[in-house]
């Protein structure tokens, strides 16, 4: 992106927006599919002397969404900081 003429702010914002959008979409899909998979696997392991409770607090979904969001945000900030140090000349060199 530097080679194409983007400045640091445009590169950072592009990376943050793209990765945070993917994080939110992935988290929503993961939370939506996670509960049915938990029920499926706990039913597979059910025995006559052991039974599982299929309750997950709604607050657990909020916590997992927030943890995924803020972890991704911190990694994006780190990535934006590291992208400032990339040399355009070195990135254009071919692998020998």
Image: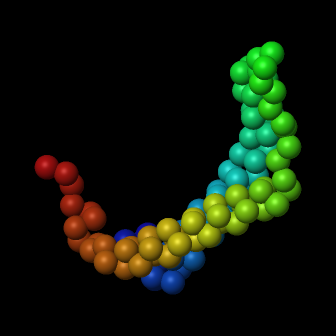
User: Is residue 8 in view from this perspective?
Assistant: yes
Residue 18 occupies which quadrant of the picture?
Answer: bottom right
- Where is residue 80? Give x, y as percent: 46, 75
Q: Residue at x 72, y 26 (%)?
A: 41
Say left or right for 15 vs 67: left
Image point 80% across, 15% down: which residue?
Answer: 48
In the image, residue 87 above or below residue 32: below
Given the current orientation, which residue lies at the most extreme top position? 48
Q: Nearer the viewer, residue 83 or 46?
A: 46
Give the side of residue 90 with respect to residue 54, left or right. Answer: left
* Left or right: 82 in relation to 71: left
Relative height, residue 55 to residue 18 (above, below)? above
Q: Position of residue 79 (x, y in %)?
A: 44, 70
Q: Work out whether residue 33 can be spotted.
A: no
Q: Residue placed at 84% from the left, 53% from the top?
A: 57
Which residue in the rendered view is the most extreme toward the left?
96
Q: How many marks?
A: 0
x%, y% of residue 36? 81, 34
At 46% from the left and 82% from the top, the residue drawn is 7
The N terminus lies in quadrant: bottom left
Q: Nearer the viewer, residue 14 or 30?
A: 30
Q: Splitting the image into 4 quarters, where does residue 78 fall? A: bottom left
Frontmost residue, 62 versus 46 = 46
How has the structure been colored for display?
rainbow
Residue 34 on image: x %, y %: 74, 40
């Amino acid at each position: 992106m530097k080679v194409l003429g983007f400045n640091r702010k445009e590169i950072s914002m592009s990376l943050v927006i793209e990765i945070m959008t993917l994080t939110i979409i992935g988290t929503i899909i993961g939370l939506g599919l996670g509960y049915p998979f938990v029920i499926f696997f706990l039913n597979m392991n059910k025995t006559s002397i052991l039974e599982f409770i299929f309750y997950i607090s709604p607050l657990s979904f909020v916590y997992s969404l927030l943890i995924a969001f803020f972890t991704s945000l911190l990694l994006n900030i780190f990535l934006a900081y590291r992208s400032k140090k990339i040399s355009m000349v070195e990135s254009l060199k071919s692998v020998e």
